[in-house]
Image (tube, rainbow, N blue to C red):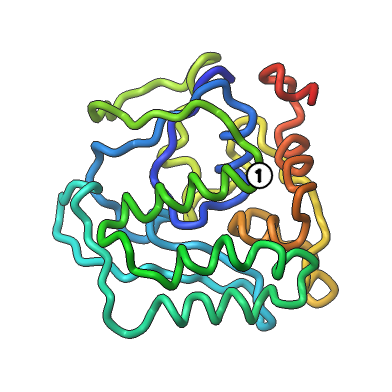
Amino acid sequence: MPEVLLTTAYFAPVSYYAYLWHSERACIEQCEHYHKQSWRNRCLLAAANGPMALTVPVEHENNQDIRSVRITENGHWRHRHWQSIASAYQSSPFFEYYEDDLRPLVEEPSLPLLFDFNELIRQRICELLDIHTPTALAEAFKPDYQSTDTLADLREEIHPKRDFRSLPGYRPKKYTQVFEGKFGFLPELSILDLLFNMGPESVLILRDSLPAPVTDKSER
């Protein structure tokens, strides 16, 4: 697919980065209102007791623009998030390899706005995964995009309350997970799960999770 339209997201699920990898261009929605209970401020990990959601606390009002939503720094959530990530993945093959790249993003409150924080994370993850898809920010909100052969509007399709099996062409490729022996393979977790478990080979999972040859990238 030539272009994909995505929301902002906090350590987005694997499908998010699979579409980023396969697309010729990407657009991140910055003109929408903030939506609660979405990947915009949460991610899902595989922990010792099963899937675990981490949520970034934010200050928001009804119909507030996503660009103005502020992160709340109360409750030491940054430290708790990193401790949860470390507890879940410290025994994974590549945790120590990526720890120094990712820990400061979570623990250092350098950006007060959720959108800017998420963009910093997305850019760093793309660097680590060697994803170079040209990405722009939406200039205006259009609620009535129609997904076509040239554009996939996934703003509300990649969502914790939607079945990932309805995503166009997406079939999660199985990979080894830390607690797979206990829970079986858990698909559509945060990109952190894939990165810590598979390291540089993560791009092969992203490639094979959208097996159709949507761009020339599929021939890498």
Q: Residue at x 40, y 20 (%)?
A: 146
Viewer-proximal residue among 72 and 153: 72
Q: Is residue 207 above or below residue 91?
A: above
Residue, x 57% and y 60% (percent of image)?
101
The quarter of the picture where residue 44 lies is bottom right
Q: Residues within 10 Å of mark 1 (few under 14, many from 20)?
A: some
Q: Quadrant of the C terminus?
A: top right
Whether residue 6 sits left or right of residue 24 in the image: it is left
From the viewer's perspective, is 126 left or right of 59? right
Q: Is residue 165 left or right of residue 79?
A: right
**Secondary structure state at the residue bearing disc 1:** helix
Q: Quadrant of residue 135?
A: top left
Q: Which residue is mark 1?
A: 129
- Amino acid at pointer 1: Leu
Relative to 219, does residue 154 appear above or below in the rendering?
below
Work out which residue is located at the far front of the displayed protein and give it.
Answer: 100
Q: Is residue 201 left or right of residue 148?
A: right
Q: Position of residue 2 (x, y in %)?
A: 55, 17
**Which quadrant of the figure contains the N terminus?**
top right
Residue at point 50%, 62% (across, down) = 43
> Residue at 29% of width from left, 39% of height from top?
30
Looking at the picture, how far across and down is residue 96, in whole percent? 71, 70
Q: Percent position (x, y) of residue 211?
A: 76, 30
Q: Position of residue 124 (x, y in %)?
A: 52, 49
Report the label total.
Answer: 1
User: Is residue 205 depicted above or below 90 in this figure?
Assistant: above
